[in-house]
Amino acid sequence: MVYKRCGWVSDDPIYQDYHDNVWGRPVYDPIELFEKLCLDGQQAGLSWITILKKQHNYQALFADFDPKIIATFDDAKVEELLLNPGIVRNRLKVNSIIRNAKAYLAFVEQGNDFSVFLWDFVGGKPVVNHFSSKGDLPAQTAASEAMSKALKKLGFNFVGPTICYAFMQAVGMINDHTTDCFCYGK
């Protein structure tokens, strides 16, 4: 059986599996949200499929995105990471994951819940849009702009409004499956 998918999905089986089983599904686990936010930041200037194909390498090299471990990474560790072709070898992007881990820890050490904080930008439940084609989807919204501003204030980086919107779509805060996609009603 052939399924109709969102127009941005290629014929790549990895991309199709991501679309069918991950993208747009609500995520509430704070560490999983932290990981996804960091990975979306790695995408800046690149296609998502590039990062998706490197996701397992990122997980292995960044301690399954455990902020406590990542926050201890020093200059020597950064140099080691920059030699690994399994990730995007961009110093600013590698350092952003470390910076984001430190910002995450500072936030939760104050008694805050990262998941609740992020989900509050959509009122705590998924926003279901009704777009009929990928051309209708916005690159950012007022909510993603507010999230970006708040995250930057906390010390996060590589979290511009467009990255935040892609993140919100990916973790199911925003359901942007097009109305003709078989995942739309799920």
Image (tube, rainbow, N blue to C red):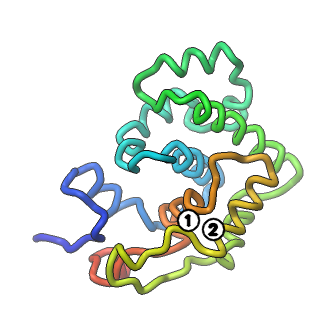
The percent position of residue 34, horizontal first and vertical second, equals 63, 49
User: Residue at horizontal 69%, vertical 17%?
Assistant: 75
- Residue placed farthest to the right in the image? 110
Q: What element carries label 2?
A: helix
Disc 2 and disc 1: Cα gap in Å? 5 Å
Mark 2–mark 1 CB contact (< 8 Å): yes
As displayed, is residue 135 above or below residue 63?
A: below
As displayed, is residue 2 above or below residue 92?
A: below
Pick whichever of labels 2 and 1 is earlier in the sequence: 2
The percent position of residue 128, horizontal first and vertical second, equals 49, 82
Quadrant position of residue 161 = bottom right
Looking at the image, which is closer to me, 170 or 89?
Answer: 89
**What amino acid is at disc 2?**
Ser
For residue 113, the mark is none
User: Residue at horizontal 63%, vertical 47%?
Assistant: 158
For mark 1, does the 10 Å Cα neighbourhood hold few (<14), some (14 to 19), or many (20 or more) residues?
many
* The N terminus sits in image quarter: bottom left
As displayed, is residue 100 above or below residue 2?
A: above
**Label 2 sits on residue:** 144
User: Residue at horizontal 86%, vertical 54%?
Assistant: 111
Q: Is residue 68 left or right of residue 181?
A: right
**Label 1 sits on residue:** 165
Q: How many marks?
A: 2
The percent position of residue 28, horizontal first and vertical second, equals 60, 62
User: Residue at horizontal 39%, vertical 45%?
Assistant: 52
Quadrant position of residue 165 = bottom right
**What amino acid is at disc 1?**
Tyr
The percent position of residue 23, horizontal first and vertical second, equals 42, 62
Q: What element carries label 1?
A: helix
